[in-house]
Amino acid sequence: MNKLLSVLLAGTVSLFCMGQAQAAFPEKPINVIVAYAPGGTGDISVRMLAKKLESILGQPLVITNKGGGAGVPGFEYVMKARPDGYTISAPATPAFSASIFLRKKAYDLNDMSFVATYMINDRILLARTDRPYKTWEEFKAYIKANPGKVSIGSGASQEAVEVLRSVAIKEGLDVNFVMYKSGGEASADLIGGHIDACELGVGTAGYQAARKGDLNILLNLGAGEVPDFPNLPKLHADLGHPFYTSAPYAFILPKGTPEDIRATWENAIKVALQDPELQNAMLKAGFSPKFMTGEESKAFCQESVNLIPAMLEFNKKAE
Amino acid sequence: MFESLMTALGMVLDWQNFFWSLFGVTFGIIVGAIPGLSDTMAIVLLLPFTYYLGPIPSIAMLMGLSKGGNFGGSIPAILFNIPGTPQAMITTFDGYPLAKQGKSGKALKTALFASVTADTASDLVLIFLAAPVAMVALRIGPPEYSMILFFSLIIISLAASGSPCRGLISTGIGLLLATVGCDPETGTLRFNFGFIELADGISIMPMAIGLLAFSEVLLQAERWYKERNRNRTEAVRLSRPGTDDDRLTPAEMKLCLPTIARSTLIGSFVGIVPGIGTTVGAYLSYIWSRKKSPYPEKFGNGALEGIAASEAGNNAVNGPNLVPLLTLGIPGNLAAALILGGFMIKGLVPGPQFMESNAPMLYALFAVLLISNLYTLIVGGIFVHYARKLTNIPKTVLFSCVMLFSFLGSYVNNSSLFDVAVMFVFGLVGYLFSKLRLSLPTMIVAFFLGSLLEHKIRQSLTISRGDWTIFIDRPIACCFFVLTVFITLFYIVRLTRGRKAARP
């Protein structure tokens, strides 16, 4: 009798708690901190998702752009916030590599609470269609035939340039790497023919031109799928190169956020991504929607964060 | 074609377009007129609204904001010597002296007339010449860019202020400040004094607010302190309604027209090259108009053409700036980047595809641009009528408000307190600059062209493997290089002659 009572009591209490937890979060507007200036891929994708998340969570999402410092200060602002689920960072992950490149300091991924990934921002290598090379193999041969004369641009990813540098070292290619400030600027110079190939994120102007057939895509530098080009060779998976660059755009909460709140968030993102309308809008914009749980996102990020120092070491040795 | 036009007409003739465009223009003028808040910020604030609107009304609102904001900035520039937006800083040169002479009404109306005329002309450039303009824009690669920037910098340092030496010093300081942040090639931090917040360089908004608005507060406070016993302060007189001081006479309008035409040309060219920006357009137009004027000494003391040149020059940038956005999907400036975001959220991807598959929408968009111009004229006219009376606000109250908005404006940009500190530091720098009679506008322009110049020169040299002849190998680049050398020589000759003549 006593046992039964205690079981019943425990059951009621836990039911009560669950009910409370569900009613409790979220009960006020949520701050989403985008650590980049408005208008970029990261900002636009979060805004697309936010609209759907608002209807799932039942609370308005207030998006604040805390730009500057390559996304590091904005990300750290959230990590220092109160871990109650009302301040969340997205797309947080680019800050990981930025911190390594800018100040040689890697984050400990245990110091934060991964919620979920909503898209993978892969880097791809593009070239003009009127060039004599249409594939990665042909491009390699072209570089070998014209040592020192080929310039590859970068739409502002230091990590992607290092990946390409490691490829050049491994394959014995003599190329020039031209850094740009943004994907838009690099796209213009690629389309204008001032550089021979260019590395860009999906969703940039160059990528849109490729979808229309005005540019060729030679290679995927990342590990994800590019929806419009399923047969694109992947540097790591298909060509066996040891390094790659892939940024899963994820929502991240400060360390110490209660698990049920994190799970509410994770589930909301999962449900949001199942919406065909959102899927469609993202694909139309050139983004690659992909859901990964917090655990999966963390493992994915851990792997790419571990790769960077090894890659830098590899590139340094060759110099 | 005809069918597309009819569809477009159907899309345009919707009350929503007219309403949101009006709303955008009005809000834009208000935000633009408040020092520290800019048109870009107005777009950021209202971007979430566009979720709930159709594509054409949302673009109508965003364009209205941008156009209204651009004009709004000239109101405080003329009335209080504080540009509401950075691009209006050239308008202060002649606008404020006119206001002090009791001709604020005339000055504001000149600004409005020049803004709207040049804006409309540059929109026509966008509508009819989008394809050729895009072709030219694509021809401009890193070496061409470098030489165009080099040319602009030389002109601005030598010709802008009375003394080429002070101009060069101002440019030098601007270029030095531009090196703060990140090495563009290796991506490592440099000159950031341990602040990770400076990794992207000094933010231009808080810096401009500090230099232009906050330093003016300091200067005014100093003046007030010095004159407090004399019990009189230099006040801006109100222009009396109905008199010639209050309006723009047809004769003056005619006088300004050639200036506006010239400035539209310069502004449009600046607009083709993405990233150079409205302030440069205004500055170069101003310099050229002064050069062309039969009485250059009047510039800086209240020449109507000075205002016309500045306003026409900065508004003419806007039309062509949209060309790369619509033809290639590449935003030419921050406002265009935000508008691109607005497009993409709506599932529209600007670029070559867009031109072909959404022709009616494109025509509708053009129509909306012209509607916004009309609204700027009407709403701007109403604002000008009432804004003149703002000069009656006691200076102590006015500058307290400016100070408040300086703090607010520098904070909201990145929601960062660090930026408020940046604003404060540059307020002091601006004060020192005024005391040393160095040119603030030259320094600001040099600052934001500086990082672009470094970037483009290093990109060119990477492509050529360190071979400097890349800058004279290509026709466009070579042309600008020769122009730069010619202008520099011209100034050296003039200076040495002037010195010889000064000697007995």
Image (cartoon, coloured by chain):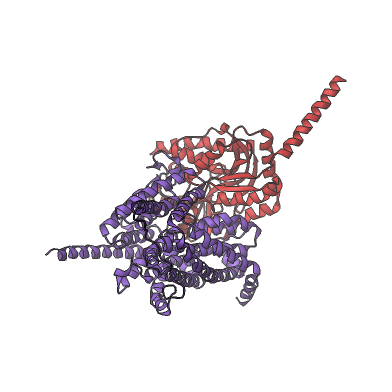
Question: In which quarter of the view is residue A169 placed?
Answer: top left
Asked whether A309 or B492 is in front, the reply is B492
| Image height of B207 relative to B355, above or below | above
Residue positioned 82% across, 23% down in the render: A6
Can the viewer see residue B384?
A: yes
Chain B shade in the render: purple
**Residue B295: x, y in percent?**
30, 72
Chain A shade in the render: red
Question: In which quarter of the view is residue A291 placed?
Answer: top right
| Image height of B262 relative to A193, above or below | below
| Image height of B491 relative to B241, above or below | above
Outermost residue, right direction? A1
Question: In which quarter of the view is residue B239 placed?
Answer: bottom left
Asked whether B423 or A153 is in front, the reply is B423
**Residue B491: x, y in percent?**
24, 64
Can the viewer see residue B277?
A: no
Quarter of the picture holding the C terminus of chain A: top left
- In the image, B286: left or right of B128? left
Asked whether B188 or B192 is in front, the reply is B192
